[in-house]
Image (spheres, rainbow, N blue to C red):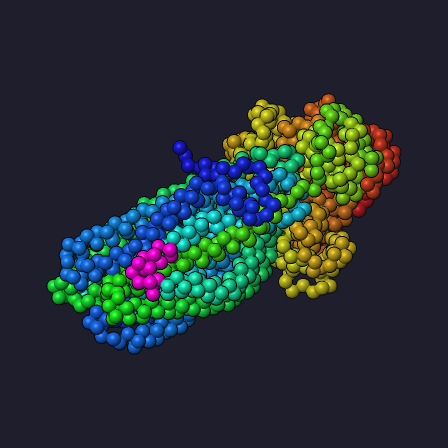
Amino acid sequence: MKPSYQSFVGLSPTSPDVSTPRRFMLRLAVGVRTPIALGVAYGILTMLARSFVPIVTGIAIDQGILKRDQRALLVWGAVMFGLVVFQAVTTTLQERCDFATNIGTSYRVMQLVGTRSAELGATLRKRVSTGEVVNLGIGDITPIGQALAATSRGLGGVAAIVGVAVIMLISAWQLALTVLIGVPALVWLLTRILTPVRRKQRAVRQRQGELAAVAVDIAGGLRVLRGIGGEEHYAQRFRDKSQSVRHASVEAAGLQARAAAARTILNGLFSTAVVWLGAHLVLSGELQVGQLVAFYGYAVFLATPLRWMTDSIEYLAQGQVSAERVSRFLALERDLPDGPAGRPAQERAELADPESGLVFPFGSFMGVACTLPDDVATLADRLGRYTESEVTLAAVPAAELSLANVRERVLVVGNDDYLFAGTLGDGLDPTGRAGTQGVMRAAEIASALDIIEALPGGLGGESQAAGRNFSGGERQRLRLLRALVADPDILVLLEPTSALDALTETSVAGRLRESRAGKTTVVFTTSPAVLGLADGVWYVEDGKAVASGAHSALLADERYKALVTREADTA
Amino acid sequence: MTALPVASSKAVRRYARTVVLKHPKELAVALALQALTAACALVIPWLLGDLVQQVQSGVNRVTAMILLIFGFLLLQGATLWLANYYAAKLAEKVVAELREDFVRDVLRLPLSTVESAGVGDLVSRSTRDVDALTQAARTNVPSTLVTATTIVVLLGALLLVRWLMIIPCLLAIPLLWPNTRRYLSRSRDGYLRERASYAKATESLAETISGSRTVEALSLVSWRSLRLRDDIDVSYRAERYTLGLRSVFLPITDTAIAIPTVATVILGGYFYDRGWVSLAGVTAATLYTQQLASLIDVLLFNQDKIQVAGAAVARLRGVSESAEGTAGAHVDGPSPSHARVTAERSPRDLEIRNVNHGYVAHDVLHDVNLVVREGERLAIVGRSGAGKTTLGRLIAGIDPPRSGAVLLGAVPLTDIPRPELRAQIALVTQEYHVFDGSVRDNLLLAKPDAAESELRQCLEAVAAWDWASELGLDARLGPGAHEPTPAQAQQISLARLLLSDPHTLVLDEATSLLNPQLARDLERSLAAVKSGRTVISVAHRLHTAHDAQRVVVMEAGRIVEDGSHEDLLAARGTYAALWNSWHGVGASA
C-alpha cells in the first residue's frame, strides 16, 4: 500500500466546524486521533525510560562501584543499556506518530484552504489577496500541525516530571519537595522571561513575511521589469527592506540571547540547589553518593521535559493563532447567496437584463457593441450573475435560481480567465466529458489546431501556469476552445477576438456562429467582422442599450458607425 | 516544466567556505565566546566530582564548593549571552546577504528560464527556502558551533580527569560513523525532492487562487481540489521517504551515543576497583559522558536541520550560479565578425541579421533580415503565431537569437550591458503587472529620481492623470486596496515606459486592453512625445499599421512583405487581405 496523507486524515473534505479556532483544532485533532494517541503513549514511555536512567546510574555506582561488586555493576550496566535502547525505539515510534499528526494535519489544512478557495470562486479575489491565501496555505499550516503533534511531547514531559518526582519521593522527600515546588516555579519564571522575546520575534516574522511578499512580487513582474530595465532599482528596494528586517532580527536576537542566558542560570541554580541539599543529606547519612549523582542527573535532566512542556504550550499558542486565521478564512461566505430553495434554471432560456434593456432570445447569435470598455465588464458581470442584479433567465430573476445551475447554463468568458498548469488536454477539458475528439473539434472552430500541433506532446504537452508558454493570441484561442468544450446553453464572450489577426478573426467568427447553432451566443465586441455575422446587434451607450438591429442597418447611425468601423481617419 | 537550477553539493560547500572566510573576525569572536561558555559549563561537573569525593570521605566543604559552582554558572550565563548575540548578529548578516543576492540574481536570470520554471518554484524558493535557511543560520548553526566546541572541550576535560576514561567514548564510533555516513549520503536528495514537490503543491494552491473566478465560471471546484490532493500526495510521500531514513538513523544513533555512558560506569567501576582512577574521576566522567550523549543528540538534530538548510542553499545558489553563467556569456559574447562596423549606419539604427530563433524544439523565426532606421515608425503585422512577438523580444534584447545577430548601430545587443540596453530600448507587452505599492512606486521603478512634474507629464501622456490624481499617487494599489482595471494597469505600464525614455520602443500589443480610439491616440503620442524616437509596434489593430511609416508582414516566421501601407495595399498581397478582412468581410465602406 502506498502511504498517503489521506489515510491518516478522517475528516470529510467539506466544511469542518470552523465557528471557533478551538473547535476547528479539535476537529482536526479528531481526524488524527490514532497517531495522536499512539504518539502520546510513546512519548510517555520514552520519557519514563529516560527518567529511569539517572537512578539506575546511581544504583550502579552505589551497588557496583562503591561496593566493588563486579556482578552488580554488570547487571545494572545492562539495565541502563536496555533502558537506552528502549528509549531509542520508542522515540523513533513517537516521531513517526508525530509526523502523521503534524504533516498529515498540515496538508489537510492546505487541502481545506485550497478547496475553500475554489468554492469561494469569484468572491475570493474581492476579499483577500493571492499572497494572503498562499500564506495561509504555506505559513499557517505548519504551526497547526505542530500544535497537534506537540501534545505527545508535552504529555511525555509531564509524565517524566511525575516519574522523577515519584522516584525522588521514594529516595528523599526533602529533595522531592524541592523539585515539586521548584519545577513549576521555574516554568512560570521562564515563560515570563520569554514572553517579550516571543512578541518581538512575532513582529520580526511579520516583517519577514512582508519581505517575502516583495520577492513573490518579482515572480509576477519579472517580464515587466525586464522590459523597462527596472531591475536594479527593484533590487535596491528589496535590499533596503532586507536590511531593515536584519536590524530588527538582530534586536530580537539580543533579547533572545539574554533570555537564553537567564534560562541557563535559572536551570543551573536549581540543579545546584538540589545538589547542595543532597550533599548535606549524604553528609548526614540519609542519602548515598550514587543517589546524589542521580539527583544531580535529575536536576539537569528535568530541563528537557520542562522544555518539552513549555515548547508544546508555545506550539499550542502559535497553532491557535494560525488556526484563527485559517478558520476565519474558511468561514468566508460567497458574496452571492443561492436563491431561496435554489430553483433550477430553465433550459433554453431567454436571457435579459432589464437595467440596460438587453434581451437575448434563446438560440440567437448576438453582438453587443459598447462605447465604454468598462461597460463590457459591468454588463458581463450582471449577465453571468457575478453581481446582484435584475437579470432574468426565462423571465425568472436569476437571483432566485441556484447559483451552480446558473453557472452551468451561462458561461462568461473574458480575456483574463485563467489557464491552469498541467497537460494541455486536461486543462481544456477538465471534466473529460468532451474527449479528445470533442476537444479537437472545438480546436478547429477556435483556430487552435496549430497551437496544439506546435506544442511538444500535443494535447498531452505541458501548459505552464497562466498559459505562460503561449502567446497572447494563442491564449485567447485556448480560452475560447475551453468554453466551446464546456458547451453551455448561453455563452457570453468578451472581446474574444481582440488578440487575433483579421483573417483568423473572420474565420473563427464564422465557424463559431455555425457551431453554436441552436444555442445562445453573446459576443461583446466592436469588430465589424464579428458584428456583421450576428443575428442582431445591441448598441450600448453609458450602460444602456440605445439601438438594436442588424449590423448593416445600424451602420446608418453615425455614432455606431464611428465605434465599429475601422476606417482610417486622416491622421 | 523545467525547474530552476539547483547548485551541486560541491558548489554549496564552496559557497559555505566563502561565507566563512568572508567574516573572519566576527566568526573568531563568536567562536571564542562559545569556547569560553563551553569551558564554564564543564567546570561544573568537575567541581561536582570533587564534591562527591569530599562528601564520600566526610569532608564538609559543601557551601564553598556550591558558591564556586554558582560563580561559574553566572560566568557561563554571561558568556552565553554574548556568544549567542554575536553568533546571531553574524548569522543575520550572512542570511541578509544570501537573500539579497538571490533576489538580485533572479532579476538577472534569462526570462525564459524563469518562465519555464513557473512562479511556484520561484515563490517557494524565496519564501520557504529563505525561511529554512534563516532558521538554520539563526539557531542551528550557532548551536552546532556551541555543541561542537563543547564536545572538544569536554573530551579535553576527560583526558585531564584521567586519560583512561576516554576509552568508553571511543566505543561509540564504530556504530556512529557508518550510520551517519549512510544517512547523510541519502538524505540530501530526499530533502531536495521534498522541497521540490512541496513547491509544486504550493503552485497548485496559488493557481487555484489566481484562477478562482475561472474555477467558479467553469465549475471546476472538484477538479482543482483533486489536483491539489494529488500534488499534496506526492509531497507527502517525499516527506515519508526522509522520515523512513530518520527512522533507521535515529534509533541506531541514540543507541550508539548511549554506549559511552554505560561503558563509563562499568569500565569506571573496574578502573576504580584497580585503583587506576579516583571516585571523583569516575563521577566526573559519568557526568561528562551523560552530557556528551545529549550534546551529540543536539549535534545530530542540528545536522538534520542544517541538511535541510543545505538543500535550501543549493536551491538559492542554483539561481545565482545560473545567473552568473548568463552574465559571463554576455561578456565573452561577440565574435569578431559582428563587431565589424557596417557602413553608413546611425548608432541608433537597428539591424536584424540572418536571425533564426525558437524556444522549445523548432525555430519560430527563419532567416529574418530587417533594418529599422532611427526615428522610424514600423508596424509588424501578420497572422497569429507568425513569430511577431518572438521578433519583438529579440529586437528588445530580451532573448539572444539562436543564430544570427541583432545589432544596435554596429554593436550586437548581447554585448550591451543590460542596464545600458534598457536605457536605449524598452519593451512593453500586453502582460501587465502592477507591483505592490503606489502608483508612484510603480513609476519610479523606471526612473528612481524622476521629478513630480515628470510623473504628471507621463501620466497625462497616457491619459491616466485624471484617475491617478483622484486616487492619489501614494495610494496603495492591488488587492485589498485599489485594484486597477486591466486598462489602468496598461496605462501604468506605458507611463513607466515614457518615464524611462528610451530612444527605441517595442510595443507588443501594448495598448490592446485600451479602447481602440484611446489606443490609437496613445500610440501616436508615444511617437510624438519625442521626435526621432523609433517605435516598433506589433499589433492586430491595423490602425497601427496604417499610421506607421512602414509595415512589415510576417508569415510562418519569415518576412514576406515590407513597405508603406499604401504600397502594400496596392500590391494586393497578404497585407491587403488582412486589411480587407479587418474591415469586415465585404463591409468595407
Q: Is residue B532 left or right of residue A1?
A: right
Q: Quarter-wise, where is residue A473 in the image?
A: top right
Q: Position of residue B25 (x, y in %)?
A: 39, 71
* A512 inside magenta stretch: no
Whether residue B479 is visible, yes or no, is yes
**Numbered disc total:** 0
Q: Residue at x 69, y 60 (%)?
A: B474
Residues A79 and A90: in front is A79
Q: Quarter-wise, where is residue A232 in the image?
A: bottom right
Q: Which quadrant: the C terminus of chain B?
A: top right
Q: Position of residue B402 (x, y in %)?
A: 51, 44
Question: Magenta span: helix, strand or loop, mainly?
Answer: helix
Residue positioned most to the top: A518
Residues A46 and B471: in front is A46
Q: Position of residue B232 (x, y in %)?
A: 49, 40
Q: Residue at x 71, y 44 (%)?
A: B513
Q: Residue at x 44, y 50 (%)?
A: A151
A258 to A524, vertically: above or below: below
Q: Position of residue B197 (x, y in %)?
A: 46, 43
Q: Residue at x 18, y 56 (%)?
A: A73
Residue positioned most to the left: B274
B76 to B410, vertically: above or below: below
Q: Is residue A149 left or right of residue B207?
A: left
Whether residue B582 is visible, yes or no, is no
B49 to A544, vertically: above or below: below
* A175 inside magenta stretch: yes
Q: Which residues are magenta?
A: A161-176
Q: Is residue B264 left or right of residue A167?
A: left
